[in-house]
Amino acid sequence: MNTAPLLAVDGLGKAFDGLIANRDISFIVHHGEIIGLIGPNGAGKTTLFNCLAGFHTPTSGRIAFEGQDITGSTPEAAAALGIARTFQIVRVFQSMTARENVMVGAMLRNKRVAEARERAEAELDFVGLSHRADTPASDLTVSEQKRLEVARALATEPKLILLDEVMAGLNPTEVREASALVHRIHQRGIASIIVEHVMEGIMPIAHRMLVLDYGAKIADGTPAQIAENPAVIAAYLGE
Amino acid sequence: MTTATILSRKGVGTIALLALAALLPLAVTEPSQQNFLILILMGAQMGVAWNIVGGYAGQVSLGHAVFYGIGAYTSTMLLLTLGLTPWIGALAGGLVAAAFALAMGWPCFRLKGHYFAMATIAVAEIMQILVTNSDALEGAVGLYLPMDQSGWGVLIFLSKLPYYYVILGLLVLTVLVSWAIERSHIGYYFRAIKDEPEAARALGVSLTRYKLIALTVSAFLTAMGGSFYAQKEMFIDPGSVFATTISIKIALIAILGGVGRLTGPVLGAVILITIEEYSRTLFGSTGSGTDMIIYAAMIILVAVFSPSGVLGLLGDLHRHLGRHLPGAKPAGGETSAKEIRP
C-alpha cells in the first residue's frame, strides 16, 4: 500500500505580477478526510484550488499527490490522477442536459457512451438530481447546478474533490442537504477540501480546518480549535 | 420503447430522404437544374464538414478554403503528373489537408474565439498568395483537367448525373462521420469544450487534442469536397478554390442552417445556394459581387434574428406549438430527444 499522504503541499506560493495570492502554504490531506478551507475574501482560497487542480502553476513550493510530484501539472492531468473540482461560479455545460453533463465527467474513465450514461445516472441519483436528468443544464436552479457540478466531478472517480463554495447562496435546508452530501462523499472514501463561507455548513462535518489570511496559512486544526484560535478571530473580526 | 420509436422514426425519415435524393434526378432531368442540385449537395457537404469543428467544437474557422483548395490541387496535380485516379487523389488530398490542419491547429488553437477565426483567415490568405505565385502549380493561370478522358476511373463525366451521385455519396459519407462523432465520447467532449472549456479541462478533457481532432477530420472531409469541385469544373485556380468567399460560404451554410446539429448545414445549403443561384440569374454576369452582398445580408439576419440558425428557429416554433401536444419532444430539440431512455 501507498503510505504517502493523499496530498502533501509544501511551501506553496503563487504570485500574479507581484501580487502575492498564496505564500508558503504547507499542509497534508489524508485519504477520505474532509478539510474545510476558510478565510476572509481575497485570502487566496480559490488561487490555492487552482494551483492544486492544475489551473495555475505555483510560483514556488511543491504539490505531491500520493507521493507523486504534480506541481505545475495541467488540469487534465490532475483530473486523470484523481483530483476533481467544482467552480465557485458554476460552469455547467449549458447546451447539454444534466445527464449529459455528468456523462462528460464519467468519460474520463470510460469512453463508452452507454457505460458513461449508466455511471452518470448513478451520480445524479447520488446528488439527488435523477428527476432532472433530461433537463437542460441551463434550466436548472443555481442550487441544482451546484449539485450537478458535484455529480460531474464525482463521475471522474476522484480520490480528492475540491468543492468551491457549494453552499453559498443556499437556504438553510439546502445547506443541511449539502453537508449531508459532503458526508456521503466522505463515506465513499473520497477526500474533500471545501472552500466555504457558510460556517454552519462546514464546521459540523470537517475533520480539519485550514485558515488562510492574506495568502498565508494562519491556522490548521479541528473546527473546535479553529473557533477558539485568536489569530482566526482576529482575521475575521479585525484587530 | 420511446427510444426505439424515435430511432425508427428517425431511421425511416433518413431512408426516405435518401431514396428521395437518389430518385430526384429522374424527375429533374434538365442539366442546369441537375447542376443546381449538385451545387446544393456540394454546399451541404462543405457545411457538414465545417460543422464538425465550427459547430460541435465551437472553433469558428473562416479559412476552410485552405483545405478545400488543398484537396482540389492535390488530386488534380496527382492526376496530371502521375495519372493517379481521383478516387485515390481525393484521399491523398484529404490526408495532406489533415496534416496541414494539424500543423496550423497547433499554433492557432493557442488563440481563443475571434483570434482563432482571424488566424484561420490569415492562413487561408497566405496559402492563396503562395499558390498564386507557385510556378509548379501554374500560379494564377490555374490547372485544367484532361478534357480528352472521361469515365469512372478519371471521375470525369460528360453528363451531370454521375456527378450528382458522386457528391451525394460524399455527402452521405460526411454525414455518417459527423453522426458517428456526435454519438461518441468525442462529440460530447466537443460540446463540452464549446460550452465551458475550463470545466471540460477539469474533467480531464485535453482541449488541444480534441480541437485538433475536430479540425483534422473537418479538413479531411472539406478537402474531398475540393477534389470533387475540381473534377466537376475541370478547371481550378487559386481564386476559385482558395478564395476567402469560399471560406465564408462554408461557414455561413452551417451557421445559417444551425450549428452543432447534424441536419443544420444541409438545410443551410438548400437556402443559401438557392438564393445564390436565383440572384445569379437575376443579376447575370454584372453582379459578380452580389454573392458577398448576399452573404453579408445573411450574416446580419442570422445574427439579429436567430443565432442558432433556421433549425433553431424551427425548434423554437416546434416547442412553442408542441408544448400542449402529446408526444412533443422536450426542450432542446434533437439532443434531448436522443437522450430519452426506455
Image (tube, coloured by chain):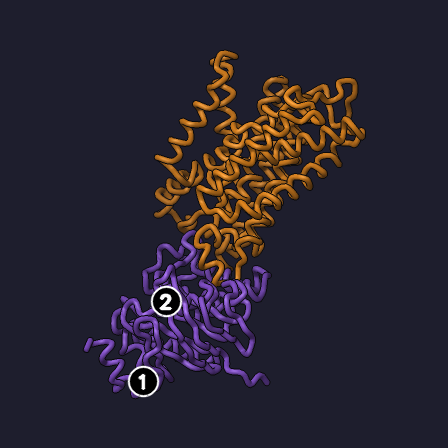
Q: Earlier in the sequence, mark 2 or mark 1?
A: 2
Point 61% across, 25% down: residue:
B238
Mark number displayed over residue A25: none
A154 relative to B162 in the view: left or right: left
Q: Amino acid at mark 2?
A: Thr
Q: Could you say which quadrant of the image residue A33 lies in?
A: bottom left
- Establish whether labels 2 and 1 are both on one chain: yes
**Residue B204 versus residue A93: which sits nearer the camera?**
B204
Disc 1 marks which residue? A223
Number of residues whose C-alpha sits closer than 10 Å to that of mark 1, classed few (under 14), some (14–19) or many (20 or more): many
Q: Secondary structure at mark 2?
A: helix
Q: Position of residue B186 (x, y in %)?
A: 57, 54
- Residue B32 occupies quadrant: top right
| Quadrant containing the N terminus of chain A in the rendered view | bottom right
The residue drawn where x is 50% and y is 72% is A158
Q: Label 2 lies in what chain?
A: A
Relative to the observer, which residue lies in front, B21 or B223?
B223
Q: Which mark is residue A46?
A: 2
Mark 2 and mark 1: Cα distance apart in space: 20 Å
User: Quarter of the image holding residue A91?
Assistant: bottom left
Tell me the purple chain. A
Q: Is residue B28 above or below residue A163?
A: above
Q: Report the mark closest to the observer, 2 or 1.
A: 2
Q: Position of residue A192 (x, y in %)?
A: 42, 76
